[in-house]
Image: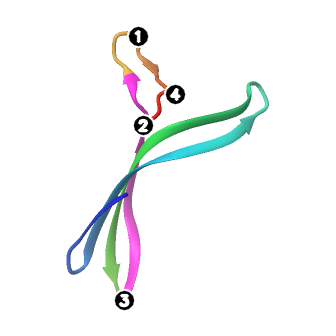
Amino acid sequence: MNIAINADVAFAHMLHQDKGNTNLSGPQEFWLRSTVCCQRANSKWLITHEHISLPVDFRSGTVLMDLTP
């Protein structure tokens, strides 16, 4: 995780692994990228924006869920 902080604004970006089960395909596990933007207001940090993305093969247009860092 990488974090950048200024007086009242902070940004964090990271890779993290998500796991879960689906009714159709059973257990799933994949890595994704996440960016979170926060702002301090009234002495509390609030998430103001979050972006999550998976790598894509642009030739086929498919998500690459089997990659690892």
Labels 3 and 2: the sequence-earlier one: 3
Point out the residue furthest to the left here.
6
Residue 50, quarter of picture = bottom left
Point out the residue furthest to the right here.
23
Residue that numbered label 1 is attached to: 60
Q: Distance of mark 1 from mark 2, alpha carbons?
A: 21 Å
- Asked if residue 65 is positioned above or below residue 7 in the image, the reply reads above
Instruction: Give amino acid for label 2.
Output: Pro
Does residue 18 belong to the magenta stretch? no
Residue that numbered label 3 is attached to: 43
Is 42 in front, or is 19? 19
Q: Nearer the viewer, mark 3 or mark 4?
A: 4
Of the numbered discs in the image, which one, if any, rests on residue 69? 2
Point out the residue furthest to the bottom here.
43
Labels 3 and 1: the sequence-earlier one: 3
Dot 2 lies on which element?
Answer: loop
Task: Give coordinates of residue 30: x percent, y percent.
Answer: 55, 35
- Asked if residue 5 is positioned above or below residue 20 in the image, the reply reads below
Residue that numbered label 4 is attached to: 65
Task: Give coordinates of residue 27: x percent, y percent.
Answer: 73, 33
- Asked if residue 18 is positioned above or below residue 54 in the image, the reply reads below
> Magenta part mainly helix, strand or loop?
strand
Q: Distance of mark 1 from mark 4, alpha carbons?
A: 14 Å
Q: Nearer the viewer, mark 3 or mark 2?
A: 2
Dot 4 lies on which element?
Answer: loop
Q: Which residues are magenta?
A: 42-56
Instruction: Give amino acid for label 1.
Output: Ser
Labels 1 and 4: the sequence-earlier one: 1
Dot 3 lies on which element?
Answer: loop
Is 38 in front, or is 15? 15
